[in-house]
Image (cartoon, coloured by chain):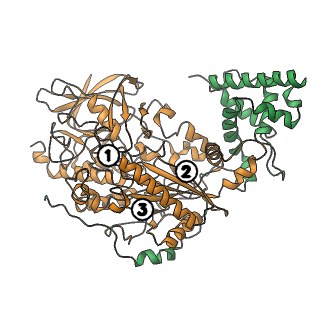
Amino acid sequence: MAEEPVDVLIIGAGASGAAFAWSLAETRMNILCLEQGDWMNPESYPGMRMDWEASQLGDFALSPNARGRREDYPVNDSASPIQASMFNAVGGSTIMYAAHFPRFHPSDFRVKTLDGVADDWPIDYQRLAPFYDVNAHMMGVSGLAGDPMYPPKAVPLPPVALGKLGETLAKGFNRLGWHWWPSDSAITTQEHEGRAPCINAGTCLLGCAQGAKASTDITYWPPALRQGVTLKTRCRVREITVGDNGMADGVIYYDADGVERRQQAHVVVLACNGIGTPRLLLNSKSKHFPGGLANRSGLIGKNLMFHPYAMVTGIFDEPLEGYKGPTGCCIMSQEFYETDRARGFLRGYSFEIVRSFGPVSTAMRGMQWGRVPWGAAHHRAFAELFDHTAGMVGICEDLPEPGNCVTLDPDLKDSDGIPAPKVTYRLSENSNKMLAHCVARATEVLEAAGAKETVTEAPLPFAGWHLMGTARMGTDPQRSVVNEWGRCHDVRNLFIIDGSIFVTAAGVNPTNTIQALALYIADTIKKNLANLFD
Amino acid sequence: MSDATHKPGLSPDEMRTLASVLDEIIPPSGDGRLPGAGQLGIAGYIDAALRKTAELKSMIAQGLADLDNLARQRNALGFAALSREDKLRLLNEQAFVLPLTFHTYIGYYQNAQVVAALGLQPRPPHPQGYEMKPNDLTLLKEVRRRAKRYREYRCICE
């Protein structure tokens, strides 16, 4: 049964969909968002329970395959050394991200010009800067102004607690004379827009029951709904439909009861992340687009970029109180961010200092590392690790390669019978060299900070948090899927606003840039309403 | 929806053997501060966990039965009655010890008594959270002195 047409239909209520809906709401257009997940109840987050750490193996596992919730869809990532991580709910993956919130750098938009690889973006840092500022307020970003690695920027709230762990590592960086700075974090450190400040519970990856971590269910969605946007949950879109004129005319979706429904729309906006968006486009075949919607370039699903992560954990003699504080936000270093060809690779990486683990995770990781055996030696081995570790992750810039891609799995389907995505990915030689450099430098820092031993994991297999590049932005329809403001070259009333449109990945977490892009695209649409499809 | 608590768990004999095995996986600490996993009652947690995973439950139940049979064949005593050395010798031969250790660690280290013995408050992290000391930003003195480190670049296509 077809429902009344809406002006704008947004698919996905995560980082980008929420920001976009909020920005466009002021137009008073009829805006509907369909989200396959549901609202989360912060009071039921694992941090409220004694078994909170075990939830990382169950209902809050990073991989949707491990969680197996109805709201999630499976991803065949068996052909990738990095597993895809995402969460489906109002708020999307911001429910379980670390909220590390750096911006891209000016140079990140000019990779081809500056370093001769990949492509330049069709927009630049200055274009996005005002939208980064808006996002900083809406998400409640904490940090410290004056970082010499960035142009001056708005940081509304003071930095998160560094703690003994952070200050110990900071001293290590200082001994080497290397850059470090308190992390930009989407975590409130003071009362902000009705949100309470962080209480250092250390459960960021399991949802924040305090509401200090910015997930879009508590930041953008409440004001967007107050302004009249409609959000329907547990509605999973199967395909975007196309009219005789080759324009998108709506979607077919399954509602909470599994009933197939049709929703017509004048504008369709995809906000489903770098895997969900190409999956939906490839599932939307028609006589106009037999190879998938908006795919005349053949680039839908191609150029998938993760951030290859290296993790080096230092073991210290003294306790570091590392179980306290925001899990992934503390300090970061960009000493090796910009290209130096003498290193043997192009582009660079950021270091992020992460907290250590609670008792369960210490025992599990100790077991995985072969350092916490069962039997008589158990207690001594556990005591050497618990509260005596500090972790550093290196987040390496991935470069786009057509062979790294999202396709449709021929067999795997979600709970509504919709074909699931398959990820094919390999690490490039450039990435492998960067990871090796990153591990060596991280080890130096940890030793300078006083670590007596280190444990290395690279690439980190579960770290497929950042999904980018699979419907890239550009001015040439042969070499890109969307134009410089997110409109599909092939379908002029179809917009993409998530990480799919990234041209390159930079060496920082992408959520802040995803949201700045969504706000910028919404702003451009508002300015061009009279001739949106020209 | 299936309710794991209604699925059959381990038998009383298996639970007795399990408790004895758990005290070998995590024995009491030498200083008496931390109890053994069996003594702490982690067998109950394991039993509940295994009810949710039939395949693992079958593997561990079979492993416990084999362990006890082997103990009787070699020593004419059930596993629980063996000496520490004999217990360890037998356990080192058993494949089920690895997955059992995994679940034992989870059950043991989320137990309030253990958490308290580690020096933490025996409560979930929320809603109280933790106090942390104010930041010492004087550590940034040297970094602040450095010149800007980013490459400035504007779009030339506009």
- Disc 1, SS: helix
Q: Earlier in the sequence, mark 3 or mark 1?
A: 3
**Closer to the eye: label 2 or 1:** 1
Q: Chain of mark 2?
A: A
Q: Which chain is green?
A: B
| Residue at the image point whose x is 31% and y is 59% from the top | A132
Camera sees residue A52 = no
Foreground of the two, A254 or A397? A397
On the question of residue B8 being in view, the answer is yes
Q: A51 or A305: which is nearer to us?
A: A305
Residue bearing mark 2:
A203
What is the number of the mark on residue A499? 1
Residues beneath discs 2 and 1 located on the same chain: yes
Residue that carries the numbered disc 3 in the rendered image:
A184
| Mark 1 neighbour class, 10 Å CA radius: few under 14, some 14 to 19, many 20 or more | many
User: Mark 3 and mark 1, same subunit?
Assistant: yes
Q: Earlier in the sequence, mark 2 or mark 3?
A: 3
Q: Position of residue A348 (x, y in %)?
A: 37, 58
Q: The chain coloured orange carries which letter?
A: A
The x, y position of residue A477, in whole percent, is: 15, 41
Circle 2: residue type: Thr
Residue type, mark 3 in image = Asp
